[in-house]
């Protein structure tokens, strides 16, 4: 099962990423750090993570 983690995008704005199964990085390659304190203020998702996650789900 994959989990979501709120980190930053390239501009520093909070976005929801999909974590890898080992929970050390995201599907787009961002290293997991402290969760954004602004996580409650966003409903934005990382497009690259979501695209990768869709490919994982479709391959099952």
Image (tube, rainbow, N blue to C red):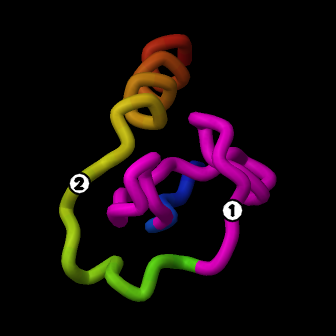
| Image location of residue 27, percent across then percent down | 60, 37
Numbered range of the magenta stretch: 7-34
Residue 44 image label: 2
At 65% from the left and 47% from the top, the residue drawn is: 30
At 53% from the left and 12% from the top, the residue drawn is: 59
Name the secondary structure under disc 1: loop
In-image side of 39 versus 7 (left or right): left
Sequence-wise, the earlier of marks 2 and 1 is 1
Label 2 with label 1: CB-CB less than 8 Å: no
As for residue 41 lying within the magenta part, the answer is no
As for residue 8 lying within the magenta part, the answer is yes
Q: Is residue 55 above or below residue 10?
A: above
In-image side of 39 versus 60 (left or right): left
| Image location of residue 58, percent across then percent down | 44, 15
User: Which residue corresponds to mark 1?
Assistant: 32
At 39% from the left and 34% from the top, the residue drawn is: 50
Gap in Å between the C-alphas at discs 2 and 1? 17 Å
Q: Is residue 59 above or below residue 27?
A: above
Query: In the current view of this chain or complex, which residue is farthest to the top?
Result: 59
Q: Is residue 58 above or below residue 19?
A: above
Of 59 and 39, nearer the camera is 39
The secondary structure making up most of the magenta span is: loop
Residue 29 in which image quadrant: top right
Residue 35 in which image quadrant: bottom right
Check the picture and name the quadrant holding the C terminus.
top right
């Amino acid at each position: 099962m994959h989990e979501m983690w709120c980190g930053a995008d390239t501009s520093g704005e909070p976005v929801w990423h999909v974590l890898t199964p080992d929970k050390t990085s995201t599907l787009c390659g961002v290293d997991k750090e402290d969760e954004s304190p602004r996580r409650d203020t966003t409903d934005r998702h990382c497009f690259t993570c979501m695209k990768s996650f869709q490919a994982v789900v479709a391959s099952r």
